[in-house]
Amino acid sequence: MDNSDENSVQFHGDEEIIEVIDLNETEQSPGNDETGDDEQEDWDTDDEMEQEKEQDDSELTFSKHTGSVFCVSLDPATNSLAVTGGEDDKAYVWRVSDGEVLFECTGHKDSVTSVLFSHDSSLVATGDMSGLIKVWKVETKQEVWSFEVGDLEWLEWHPCAPVLLAGMADGNVWMWKIPGGDCKTLQGPGCQSTSGKVLPDGKRAVVGYEDGNVRLWDLKQGNATHVIKGYDGHQGALTCLACNKDGSLVLTGSVDGCAKLINTASGKVLGVFSVDGGKAKASQEDADETNSVESVGFCNVLPLIAVAYLSGTLGIYDLSSQVLRHKCQHQAGIVHLQWEESSSVVSTCSLDGAVRLWDARSGTMVSEYRGHQAEILDFTLNREASMAVTASGDHQAKVFLLQRPDR
C-alpha cells in the first residue's frame, strides 16, 4: 500500500484517525501441529438426564447443525443475528427471533471452531481447524475474503476497524485488513498462541502462549512492548484472557489453576488468584488439570473479577484486596463466563448443559436455565442481558430469554 490514507484505520464514531497498523505484504504461514478436540464425558446418572430431558426453558432451538455446535457469536450492532459454527464443517448466520437462516457460510473443510461478527456487524468471520478462514459480508451474504493458514487457534476482530487477527499453532499472530487482505505478522516464540485480544484503544493486543508467557504487542510497530514470563508468567498454557473497560488491566487464566492480573502499561503482575488461595504450582506436571482456569472477566460496575474453573467453581474476587469473596459451585466444569454489561450479575455455562446467573455481591444463584441434552460449549449474552444464545454438544443452539425480578 502506497499512501498513508490507505494505511490509516478509521475509528467509527470518533473524529480522529489513528494509524493502527501499516499493512504492506501478504505472507504465507506453514502448517503446524494439530490441536486436540474437546473430550466429552458423562456427568449425570440416567435418572438425572431423563429429568433434564423433560425440562426445556429455551425460547427457540436452532437445529440445522448435524454435529456438536462449538461456537456462537451475536452481532454487536443489533443483537438480532447469531452465527454458529460446528463439527459438521458448517457455519450459519441466523435470526434469533425465529431461527431463520440468512445464509450458510459454505466451503469449510473441517470443524468450524471460530465465528464472530466485526465491530459494526457488517462482516462475519469463520475459521475451521484446518486453518481456512473466510469473511462474509452480511448485507450481500457473499464471501468477500478467504485465506488458508496453519492450524488456527483463535480469531479476533479489531474493536473499531475492519481488521482481523488470528493466532496460530506456530505462535505467530496474523493481522489482515479486510477485504483488501494486506497483512502483518506478530512473530511468536515458536510455541502455540492459545488466546488473544485487542485492547479497547485499538493500538495494542495481549496474546497468551502455550509456554505460560504473555506478550503485550504494539500493533502499529509490530513489536512486543512487554513479555510476562518466568515467575511472573504462568506455569502452564494460557487458556483465556479478558481486559477491563478501559484496557488498563488484563486478566489471564491458565491450566496451572491461576488467574493473573496484569497492568497493560507497565507489564507488571498486580495479583495472582487461585481458588485455594495458594501460589501458582511449581511446575506444569504438578498442576491439577481439573482445576484449569477456563474463563475470566471483569465486572463493569463493581471492583470484582470472576474466575471460572474446570472443577466447577466460580470464584468471585475483590479486585483491590484480591480476597476471594464467594465460591459459586456448579455440578460440572464451567466452560465460559460473561458479566452483564451494567450489573453485578455474572452468567456461566457448564458441562452439565445449564446456563446459570449469579449475583456476585452475595454469591447466590439468581436463576438456572436448562434444555440442552449435552454440554454447553459456548454462549453469549445480548447487550441488555435479557437473552442468552448457547452452543452445545447436542447439535443444537438455543435462545434463552433471561428473566430477573429486578427487570
Image (tube, rainbow, N blue to C red):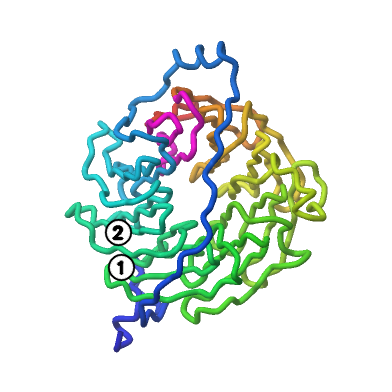
Q: x, y percentage for residue 312?
A: 65, 33
Q: Give 27 or 334, whichever is nearer the viewer.
A: 27
Q: Disc 1, disc 2: CB below 8 Å?
A: yes
At 51% across and 31% down in the image, what residue appears?
A: 375
Name the image quarter holding the N terminus: bottom left
Query: Badge 1: few (under 14), some or many (20 or more) residues near its Cα, within 10 Å?
Result: some
Name the image quarter holding the C terminus: top left
Q: Amino acid at mark 1?
A: Ile
The magenta segment is 372-398
Q: Give 386 or 198, whichever is nearer the viewer.
A: 198
Name the side, left or right, on which 132 lies relative to 32.
left
Tag 1, which secondary structure? Answer: loop
Q: x, y percentage for residue 378?
A: 47, 40
Numbered tag placed on residue 168 in the rendering: none
Which residue is disc 1 drawn over?
A: 178
265 in relation to 78, above or below: below
Which residue ends up furthest to the bottom in the rendered image? 2
Q: x, y percentage for residue 34?
A: 51, 55
Which residue is disc 2 drawn over?
A: 135
